[in-house]
Each structure stands twice: as structure tokens, then as C-alpha cells.
Image: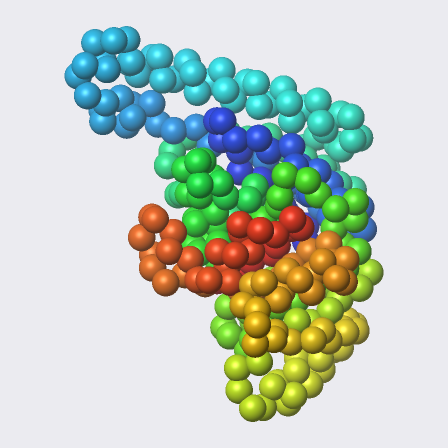
Amino acid sequence: MAIRNIFIPVFRGAPFRTQLDAALQLCTKDAAHINVVFVRPDAAAIAASIPDMLVAAGISVEHIESEGLAAEAEAKAEFEKWRVANGIKSGLVGTDVSSATWRERVGPLEAVVVEVGRLSDLTILARPDVYETDVYRAFDAAVFESGRPALIVPDHLPQKILDHIIVAWNSSLQATRAIAGALPLLRIADQVSVFTAPTHADEAIRDLYLGEQLAWHGIRANYLTPVTENESVGEALLGAAREQQATMLVMGAYTHSRIREMLLGGVTRHILRHADIPALMMH
């Protein structure tokens, strides 16, 4: 199985060029379709929630609709420019050549990201920023609700994101799902390493089983030094990634709460704040 259908959600005010470039890199080894979906909010629903004083100031359904359409047109023009410059064919043209489509959806951002994400092999998102509420909403929906892998990309990509992938392994359900979701990428990566955070005495047996499982899929993995007493798991993981010149992380995503304030687990939060390479996550 390979990554054939890549979903990139786009919405007003959020740059998406790096997501496109990440998808393009993934297409260099295996042809894939890049499904770019611009999510526009329902103008009538927004207008219904606006106080009367804003309505009096000219904030109407028509105004909201007009701004949304203008934002979509601008984003679509940027997408088309990127597509033509990179020689990507438009539309659904088969499985032997990479292609891309632009679509529009109207509705709540989370609902669209979950719906389309569940029917995609991979969702590519920008790294969440505390000042960008919509980016966090898209991240939350894709990682914690879609049931599919999500690749979180920083502002600047490595030259080859499939050069060296590090898998963060701790025997958890989330890490297991992340590895399963990442298998198509692990198979075509130039190098794969496993970072283990020991939690119990039988870690050697656990690592052996993981190595065997990866080997059944033709993946030969190296093992990295586990976390030390003086470092948190997140710090040790990023330290190992820098030392090994890793170009992508694969890890489970954890949260202590399902509320919108995004009370993430410590390792997940640390990676999102400090990683300078893409991270594939699943919950």
C-alpha cells in the first residue's frame, strides 16, 4: 500500500505553500494525488451570531460571503501558479502520474477536515501557532478525530523529507497507529531509525518485536540511544533527531483533554513547539 491520496486543507489567512511543497516531495518516489480543499465558513451561520452593532456597521451575510470568495480566489490563483510551475497535472488522471485538484467546501472547518481526512491516506497541515486559532482547529480535527495520519510541517522543509525518518516508540496504542499510518513512507525512506523511551524492564524484547514487524515490510531500522535521566522525552527525541540529521519524525499524539484549549501531552506539545522537521502524528 502507498500514499495515493493526500489531503491539504486550506482556509483564509493561513499560508499553505509549505504543505504543497511537502506533498510534492512525497510524490517524487510514488505518484500521488494532491487534494487541496479550501474551507469557507457558512456566511449565514456567522452572520446569525454577530451582534446587532456589527450588523449596523455593515457586517452582513453578503459582506462575509464576498470576503470568503475573494480569499478563495486568491488562494486558488496561488495554487494554480504552484501547480503549473511544478508540472503537476490537474484533475484525476490515474495512479501512475502525480496530479492535483482544487475544491471548495462550505461549512465548519473541523467537520470538513474530519470528513475529508477520513477518506484520505494522509493529511498535511502547517504547524499550529498559538496566534492562529483556525490552524489549531484543523490540527485538532485531523490528528484526534480523523483516524488517519497527519503530517505536521514547519515553515521550512528539509531538502529531502524522506532522507531519514525517526520513529518514536513506547509501545502505546498511539505510537502503534502512527507506525501503521507511516508504513508507506517508511518503506520508501532512505533511512529509518527507532527512538525508544524505556518505560519497563522488557524494553529489549519490545524493541526486538518492533524490529521484526518493520522487517516484514522490508524496513531495516537502526536503534538510537534512549532518553537519559537529565532530559525529558521530548528534549531527548529532538536531540537525537538533530544528531542523526533526521528529516521526519513519526510519533503518537497524546492529549490530556478533549477541550478546545488543546491540553496536549508533554511530548506532543514539545515537538509542536520546537521541532524544525515534519512530524507524522496519529492518536
Q: Position of residue 128 (x, y in %)?
A: 50, 43
Relative side of 160 to 213, left or right = right
**Residue at point 69%, 85% (across, down):** 208
Where residue 182 sits: x, y (%)? 64, 61
Which residue is at 44% across, 41% downward?
130
Side (left or right) of 112 relative to 149: left
* Res 208 visible: yes
Indicate the position of residue 276 as horizontal and vertical percent values: 65, 48
Q: Residue at x 49, y 31 (%)?
A: 11
Q: Is residue 186 above or below residue 127?
A: below
Instruction: State whether residue 153 is above or below residue 196.
Output: above
User: Where is residue 215 drawn, in percent x and y?
Assistant: 75, 77
Image-based side of 93 in relation to 251, left or right: right
Q: Residue furthest left?
A: 52
Q: Quadrant of the N terminus?
A: bottom right
Q: Nearer the viewer, residue 100 or 244?
A: 244
Quarter where residue 264 is shown: bottom left
For image coordinates 38% across by 33% down, the residue present is: 107
Instruction: Residue at the far front: name it.
Output: 230
Q: Is residue 183 visible?
A: no
Residue 267 vs residue 255, the one in the foreground: 267
Viewed as shown, does residue 209 lie left or right of 38?
right
